[in-house]
Image: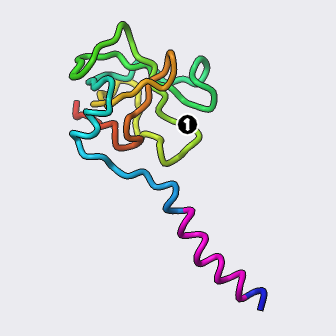
Amino acid sequence: MKLKIGVLLLFFVLPITGICNYQKEMDLQEKAAQSELVVIARVDSIYEAGCKVNFICARLHVEKFLKGSAEGDLQFAFHGPLAELNSTCCKSGKYYLVFLKKLDSSNWASVNGPFGVYDLPE
């Protein structure tokens, strides 16, 4: 009897935890509205040292600001502890369209997790 109850609980609990971590894609207007910066940028380098704890960062050299402005290169924290929020970018030398929000005083993050970064053709 305990085994049957345990199995039934698994059928109800496991699907709920999978839904909890789901990242819904925003439409383009919503991404733009929630972004502090929208940029076309080239990834200059990828690094962990000097990045936010538990994150991997990319140094973005902005080619064009489509929304907002900032001085110098941007530190983009693109890979962190929550897999659902991780972007599928970044490769050195590649160009991306990125919807960004301020993460802290020196780091930026995608406004919509993996859906806030678009790989651009060369």
- Quadrant housing the N terminus: bottom right
Q: Name the residue at the right extreme.
A: 2
Above-or-below relation of 79 to 95 = below
Residue 53 placement: quadrant: top right
| Quadrant of the drawing holding the C terminus | top left
Residue at image x 64%, y 83%? 8
Assign the magenta stretch its main secondary structure.
helix
Q: Amino acid at mark 1?
A: Gly
Q: How many numbered marks appear?
A: 1
Q: Position of residue 2 (x, y in %)?
A: 78, 87
Residue 21 drawn above or below residue 43 = below
Q: Is residue 91 left or right of residue 21?
A: left
| Residue under numbered circle 1 | 80
User: Where is residue 115 shown, x and y percent of the image?
Assistant: 34, 43
Decide if residue 81 is on the left or right side of residue 2. Answer: left
Quick one: 68 or 73, which is closer to the camera?
68
Residue positioned most to the top:
71
- Which residue is at 42% across, 51% downward? 23
Magenta span of residues: 4-17
Which of these two is toward me, 86 or 101? 101
**Few, some or many residues within 10 Å of mark 1 (<14, 14–19, 20+):** some
User: At 38% across and 23% down in the image, what residue appears?
Assistant: 43
Q: Position of residue 10 (x, y in %)?
A: 64, 76
Report whether 6 appears left or right of 91. right
